[in-house]
Amino acid sequence: MSPQSVVPQLRMTDAARSIAFYVDQLGFVIDWQHQFEPGLPLFLQLTREGQTIFLSGHAGDCEPGGAVYFWVADADALHDRFVARGVRPLKPIETMPWGVREFLLVDPDHNKLRFGTELPD
């Protein structure tokens, strides 16, 4: 697999709530964070199994309600791990007409996170 060349950026409105969701429930790790000073918005880089995203508390960076698609090795196993951690998918794991097993989560800021595995022909 080639290195990731684009980093999706999603808006967060409550850093503690977003960190609890992404780190505690989805298993992302905080690579680094930046805050100009206490009380100002937080900016995070998170990575999970080689896939990196940015979360920004800065209102001017992007709006809540974005979307990211994550290609994963085994969507069924990942779905089961997330559910075991208390995550409730908006759409459960299913086989799509375009040959992908996928499910949909929504984060606390209504950003859509799809996880999918391409099925063999």
Image: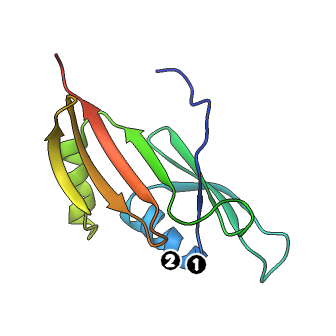
Residue, disc 1: 14
Q: Secondary structure at mark 2?
A: helix
| Relative height, residue 30 to residue 71 (above, below) | below
Residue 104 falls in image quadrant: bottom left
Identified at 52% across, 21% down, the residue is 2
- Disc 2 residue crowd, few under 14, some 14–19, many 20+, Cα 10 Å: few
Identified at 51% across, 57% down, the residue is 66
* Quadrant where the C terminus is found in the figure: top left
**View extreme (front): residue:** 97
- Disc 1 residue crowd, few under 14, some 14–19, many 20+, Cα 10 Å: some
Identified at 17% across, 33% down, the residue is 97
**Visible residue check, residue 80:** no
**View extreme (bottom): residue:** 39
Q: Looking at numbered disc 1 in the image, what kind of residue is underneath it?
A: Asp
- Residue 67 percent location from the top left of the image: 47, 52
**View extreme (top): residue:** 121
Residue 72 falls in image quadrant: top left
Q: Is residue 112 left or right of residue 59?
A: left
Front-most of 93 and 22? 93
Q: Looking at numbered disc 2 in the image, what kind of residue is underneath it?
A: Arg
Front-most of 105 and 52? 105
Q: Is residue 81 left or right of residue 42?
A: left
Q: Secondary structure at mark 1?
A: loop
Q: Is residue 26 left or right of residue 88?
A: right
Residue, disc 2: 17
Residue 85 falls in image quadrant: bottom left
CA–CA distance in space, label 2 to label 1: 5 Å
